[in-house]
Amino acid sequence: IKQFTHQLTLQLDKFDFIKDNCNKIGVESGVIGTAVLGLLIFFVVIDFGAKIITDVVSLVYPAYASFKAVESPDPDDDKQWLTYWVVIGCYSIADSFLDIFFFWVPFYFVIKLAFVLYLALPHTKGAVYLYDKVVKPFFLKN
């Protein structure tokens, strides 16, 4: 947990708002971030607000990362996030029809959250993988 908290501190301290407020209260941003993540995961596991949490995770961070990608000169990150939006769009359409069946699966929202994180996190490149293996061949064929 110490390693995770340290890495989270490095990431969160990039945001002046977070860093300044954490310094005011005298707590590392990674400690607060770890606590918030733990609480959110707990809520997802007990299915308290799980849908809104998974929806926010699938939209807020990717939207912010897409903004940063558009503003950066590197075209590779643009492809990463455009691919994410195509894949998450396809997934959302399928999920809206299949939700009635999968809603009854134990820990459905935990699985959904893990899947969305797999798609969104740049180091997993899950969206790129699914795009190349599933979405692109489907649309090229049809």
Image (cartoon, grey):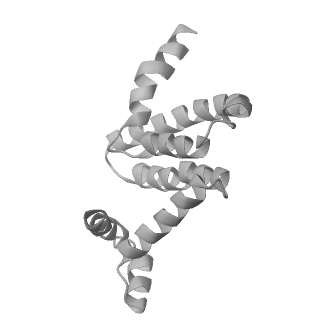
Classify residue 8 as left or right of residue 142: left
Would you identify the image quadrant in which residue 9 lies? bottom left
As displayed, is residue 129 above or below residue 12? Answer: above
Q: Position of residue 88 (x, y in %)?
A: 55, 36
100 or 11: nearer the eye?
100
Would you identify the image quadrant in which residue 75 lies? top left
Q: Position of residue 63 (x, y in %)?
A: 52, 52
Classify residue 71 as left or right of residue 89: left
Indicate the quadrant containing the C terminus: top left, top right, bottom left or bottom right.
top right
The residue located at (51%, 42%) in the rendering is: 116
Report the number of numbered marks: 0
The residue located at (54%, 53%) in the rendering is: 57
As displayed, is residue 129 above or below residue 116? Answer: above
Indicate the quadrant containing the N terminus: top left, top right, bottom left or bottom right.
bottom left
Q: Position of residue 120 (x, y in %)?
A: 45, 44
The residue located at (47%, 63%) in the rendering is: 37
As displayed, is residue 66 above or below residue 19? Answer: above
Q: Position of residue 64 (x, y in %)?
A: 49, 56
128 or 118: nearer the eye?
118
The residue located at (47%, 49%) in the rendering is: 66
